[in-house]
Amino acid sequence: DTAVSQTPKYLVTQMGNDKSIKCEQNLGHDTMYWYKQDSKKFLKIMFSYNNKELIINETVPNRFSPKSPDKAHLNLHINSLELGDSAVYFCASVGTPKETQYFGPGTRLLVL
Amino acid sequence: GESVGLHLPTLSVQEGDNSIINCAYSNSASDYFIWYKQESGKGPQFIIDIRSNMDKRQGQRVTVLLNKTVKHLSLQIAATQPGDSAVYFCAEKTGNTGKLIFGQGTTLQVKP
Protein backbone atom coordinates (compact mmCIF):
# COMPACT_ATOMS: atom_id res chain seq x y z
CA ASP A 1 0.00 0.00 0.00
CA THR A 2 3.00 2.27 0.52
CA ALA A 3 2.86 5.10 -2.01
CA VAL A 4 6.45 6.34 -1.81
CA SER A 5 8.98 4.10 -0.15
CA GLN A 6 12.66 4.58 0.60
CA THR A 7 15.45 2.24 1.63
CA PRO A 8 17.24 2.18 3.92
CA LYS A 9 15.47 4.09 6.67
CA TYR A 10 18.71 4.56 8.58
CA LEU A 11 22.23 4.66 7.22
CA VAL A 12 25.31 5.10 9.38
CA THR A 13 28.63 5.14 7.59
CA GLN A 14 32.19 6.40 7.74
CA MET A 15 33.52 9.47 6.00
CA GLY A 16 34.87 8.73 2.56
CA ASN A 17 32.54 5.81 1.87
CA ASP A 18 30.18 5.57 -1.10
CA LYS A 19 26.52 4.81 -0.45
CA SER A 20 23.20 4.63 -2.27
CA ILE A 21 19.66 5.24 -1.16
CA LYS A 22 16.68 4.07 -3.12
CA CYS A 23 13.20 5.35 -3.77
CA GLU A 24 10.19 3.74 -5.36
CA GLN A 25 6.69 5.06 -5.95
CA ASN A 26 3.62 3.08 -6.95
CA LEU A 27 1.43 6.09 -7.70
CA GLY A 28 2.06 6.06 -11.43
CA HIS A 29 3.65 9.49 -11.22
CA ASP A 30 6.01 10.75 -13.89
CA THR A 31 8.12 13.07 -11.77
CA MET A 32 10.25 12.30 -8.74
CA TYR A 33 12.42 14.43 -6.47
CA TRP A 34 15.15 14.22 -3.90
CA TYR A 35 15.16 16.67 -0.99
CA LYS A 36 17.65 17.16 1.81
CA GLN A 37 16.42 18.15 5.28
CA ASP A 38 19.08 19.57 7.57
CA SER A 39 19.26 19.55 11.34
CA LYS A 40 17.14 22.71 11.47
CA LYS A 41 14.39 20.96 9.52
CA PHE A 42 14.94 23.08 6.42
CA LEU A 43 13.84 21.18 3.29
CA LYS A 44 15.72 21.89 0.08
CA ILE A 45 15.25 20.33 -3.30
CA MET A 46 18.26 18.60 -4.81
CA PHE A 47 17.13 16.88 -8.00
CA SER A 48 14.08 16.11 -10.06
CA TYR A 49 13.51 13.53 -12.78
CA ASN A 50 10.61 13.42 -15.21
CA ASN A 51 10.21 10.13 -17.06
CA LYS A 52 13.85 9.26 -16.40
CA GLU A 53 15.06 12.67 -17.59
CA LEU A 54 16.80 15.09 -15.23
CA ILE A 55 14.82 18.35 -15.10
CA ILE A 56 16.03 20.01 -11.90
CA ASN A 57 19.59 19.97 -10.67
CA GLU A 58 20.15 22.40 -7.84
CA THR A 59 23.59 23.43 -6.68
CA VAL A 60 24.58 20.07 -5.30
CA PRO A 61 28.14 18.71 -5.15
CA ASN A 62 28.85 16.35 -8.01
CA ARG A 63 29.51 13.64 -5.43
CA PHE A 64 25.74 13.24 -5.52
CA SER A 65 24.45 11.43 -8.58
CA PRO A 66 20.79 10.57 -9.07
CA LYS A 67 19.78 7.69 -11.30
CA SER A 68 16.34 6.83 -12.58
CA PRO A 69 16.15 3.34 -14.11
CA ASP A 70 12.44 3.82 -14.79
CA LYS A 71 9.82 6.37 -13.89
CA ALA A 72 8.85 4.54 -10.70
CA HIS A 73 12.36 4.58 -9.26
CA LEU A 74 14.82 7.31 -8.38
CA ASN A 75 18.01 6.40 -6.59
CA LEU A 76 20.65 8.64 -5.10
CA HIS A 77 24.28 7.66 -5.04
CA ILE A 78 26.72 9.61 -2.89
CA ASN A 79 30.47 9.30 -3.34
CA SER A 80 33.14 10.16 -0.79
CA LEU A 81 30.71 10.93 2.00
CA GLU A 82 31.46 13.94 4.19
CA LEU A 83 30.33 14.88 7.67
CA GLY A 84 28.13 17.63 6.22
CA ASP A 85 26.16 15.09 4.23
CA SER A 86 24.52 13.95 7.46
CA ALA A 87 20.85 14.79 7.07
CA VAL A 88 17.50 13.25 6.30
CA TYR A 89 16.94 12.64 2.59
CA PHE A 90 13.39 12.56 1.30
CA CYS A 91 12.11 11.30 -1.97
CA ALA A 92 8.87 12.68 -3.38
CA SER A 93 6.75 12.18 -6.47
CA VAL A 94 4.08 14.15 -8.27
CA GLY A 95 1.62 13.46 -11.03
CA THR A 96 0.25 15.79 -13.68
CA PRO A 97 -0.35 18.68 -13.17
CA LYS A 98 2.80 19.00 -11.12
CA GLU A 99 1.32 20.16 -7.87
CA THR A 100 0.83 17.95 -4.84
CA GLN A 101 4.03 16.11 -4.05
CA TYR A 102 3.88 12.95 -1.99
CA PHE A 103 6.85 12.27 0.25
CA GLY A 104 8.52 9.09 1.34
CA PRO A 105 9.37 8.36 4.99
CA GLY A 106 12.95 9.60 4.66
CA THR A 107 16.43 8.11 4.94
CA ARG A 108 18.40 9.26 7.97
CA LEU A 109 22.04 9.43 6.97
CA LEU A 110 24.72 9.82 9.61
CA VAL A 111 28.32 10.19 8.49
CA LEU A 112 30.90 9.56 11.20
CA GLY B 1 16.30 34.98 -4.41
CA GLU B 2 13.12 33.08 -3.79
CA SER B 3 12.17 32.37 -0.24
CA VAL B 4 9.22 31.27 1.74
CA GLY B 5 9.27 32.03 5.40
CA LEU B 6 7.19 31.40 8.44
CA HIS B 7 6.78 34.06 11.06
CA LEU B 8 7.19 31.95 14.18
CA PRO B 9 9.42 28.95 14.70
CA THR B 10 7.23 27.60 17.52
CA LEU B 11 3.55 27.97 18.33
CA SER B 12 2.10 26.65 21.56
CA VAL B 13 -1.68 26.34 21.91
CA GLN B 14 -4.13 24.81 24.33
CA GLU B 15 -6.01 21.74 23.22
CA GLY B 16 -9.36 22.78 21.79
CA ASP B 17 -8.19 26.23 20.77
CA ASN B 18 -7.80 27.33 17.16
CA SER B 19 -4.29 27.59 15.71
CA ILE B 20 -3.08 29.98 13.06
CA ILE B 21 0.24 29.38 11.37
CA ASN B 22 1.53 32.10 9.09
CA CYS B 23 3.79 32.14 6.10
CA ALA B 24 5.19 34.91 3.92
CA TYR B 25 6.35 34.21 0.39
CA SER B 26 8.40 36.38 -1.89
CA ASN B 27 7.67 35.29 -5.46
CA SER B 28 4.57 36.98 -6.81
CA ALA B 29 4.67 34.62 -9.82
CA SER B 30 4.03 31.55 -7.66
CA ASP B 31 0.81 29.89 -8.74
CA TYR B 32 0.34 27.13 -6.22
CA PHE B 33 0.78 26.87 -2.48
CA ILE B 34 0.69 23.89 -0.19
CA TRP B 35 0.84 23.11 3.50
CA TYR B 36 2.55 20.02 4.83
CA LYS B 37 2.58 18.47 8.28
CA GLN B 38 5.66 16.60 9.42
CA GLU B 39 5.47 14.43 12.50
CA SER B 40 8.60 13.33 14.27
CA GLY B 41 10.46 10.66 12.30
CA LYS B 42 8.15 10.84 9.31
CA GLY B 43 8.02 12.47 5.91
CA PRO B 44 5.98 15.60 5.15
CA GLN B 45 2.32 14.81 4.76
CA PHE B 46 -0.02 16.84 2.56
CA ILE B 47 -2.63 18.85 4.47
CA ILE B 48 -4.21 21.31 2.07
CA ASP B 49 -3.35 23.32 -1.01
CA ILE B 50 -4.55 26.40 -2.81
CA ARG B 51 -4.06 27.84 -6.26
CA SER B 52 -3.28 31.48 -6.83
CA ASN B 53 -6.70 32.17 -8.33
CA MET B 54 -8.33 31.47 -4.97
CA ASP B 55 -8.09 33.25 -1.63
CA LYS B 56 -9.57 30.64 0.67
CA ARG B 57 -9.95 26.91 0.75
CA GLN B 58 -11.39 24.73 3.47
CA GLY B 59 -10.72 21.17 4.42
CA GLN B 60 -11.63 19.11 7.41
CA ARG B 61 -10.76 21.31 10.42
CA VAL B 62 -8.22 23.21 8.30
CA THR B 63 -8.50 26.37 6.25
CA VAL B 64 -5.86 27.98 4.08
CA LEU B 65 -6.02 31.68 3.34
CA LEU B 66 -4.04 33.34 0.57
CA ASN B 67 -3.47 37.07 0.40
CA LYS B 68 -1.62 37.80 -2.82
CA THR B 69 -1.52 41.54 -2.16
CA VAL B 70 0.83 41.10 0.76
CA LYS B 71 2.13 37.66 -0.29
CA HIS B 72 0.88 35.96 2.81
CA LEU B 73 -0.41 32.48 3.41
CA SER B 74 -1.94 31.11 6.59
CA LEU B 75 -3.11 27.77 7.88
CA GLN B 76 -5.92 27.71 10.40
CA ILE B 77 -6.56 24.57 12.42
CA ALA B 78 -9.86 24.46 14.28
CA ALA B 79 -10.17 22.79 17.67
CA THR B 80 -6.52 21.82 17.82
CA GLN B 81 -5.87 18.31 19.09
CA PRO B 82 -2.74 16.67 20.53
CA GLY B 83 -2.39 14.74 17.28
CA ASP B 84 -1.89 18.05 15.49
CA SER B 85 1.48 18.50 17.21
CA ALA B 86 4.05 18.53 14.43
CA VAL B 87 6.17 20.81 12.27
CA TYR B 88 4.16 22.62 9.62
CA PHE B 89 5.68 23.78 6.36
CA CYS B 90 4.32 26.04 3.69
CA ALA B 91 5.68 25.72 0.18
CA GLU B 92 5.21 27.59 -3.06
CA LYS B 93 5.49 26.46 -6.66
CA THR B 94 6.63 28.61 -9.53
CA GLY B 95 6.86 27.45 -13.13
CA ASN B 96 6.05 24.04 -14.55
CA THR B 97 8.91 21.89 -13.27
CA GLY B 98 6.96 21.31 -10.07
CA LYS B 99 9.78 22.68 -7.97
CA LEU B 100 8.56 23.50 -4.46
CA ILE B 101 10.31 26.04 -2.27
CA PHE B 102 9.75 25.35 1.39
CA GLY B 103 9.61 27.69 4.34
CA GLN B 104 11.51 27.09 7.55
CA GLY B 105 8.70 25.35 9.37
CA THR B 106 6.66 26.12 12.48
CA THR B 107 6.57 23.66 15.33
CA LEU B 108 3.05 23.41 16.73
CA GLN B 109 2.87 22.25 20.34
CA VAL B 110 -0.55 21.36 21.73
CA LYS B 111 -0.90 21.50 25.48
CA PRO B 112 -3.47 19.19 27.06
Image: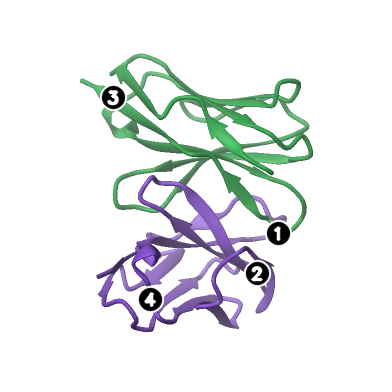
Residues at badges 3 and 4 in contact (C-beta under 8 Å)? no
Which residue matches tag 1?
A96
Which residue matches tag 2?
A30
Quadrant position of residue A112: bottom left
Quadrant position of residue B50: top right
Q: Which is more toward the observer, B57 or A64?
A: A64
Which residue matches tag 4?
A81
Residue B18's x, y, as percent? 41, 16
Element type at mark 3: strand
Q: CA distance from mark 3 to mark 4?
A: 38 Å
Q: Tell me, yes or no, whether dots 3 and 4 are on the same chain.
A: no
Quick one: label 2, few (<14), some, or many (20+) residues within 10 Å? many
Residue A16's x, y, as percent? 34, 81
Which residue matches tag 3?
B110
Determine the chain carrying the residue at label 2.
A
Residue A51 appearing in the image: no
Element type at mark 4: loop
Q: Is residue B61 left or right of residue B32?
A: left
**Letter of the green chain:** B
Element type at mark 1: loop
Mark 3 or 1: the one toward you: 3
Image colour for chain A is purple
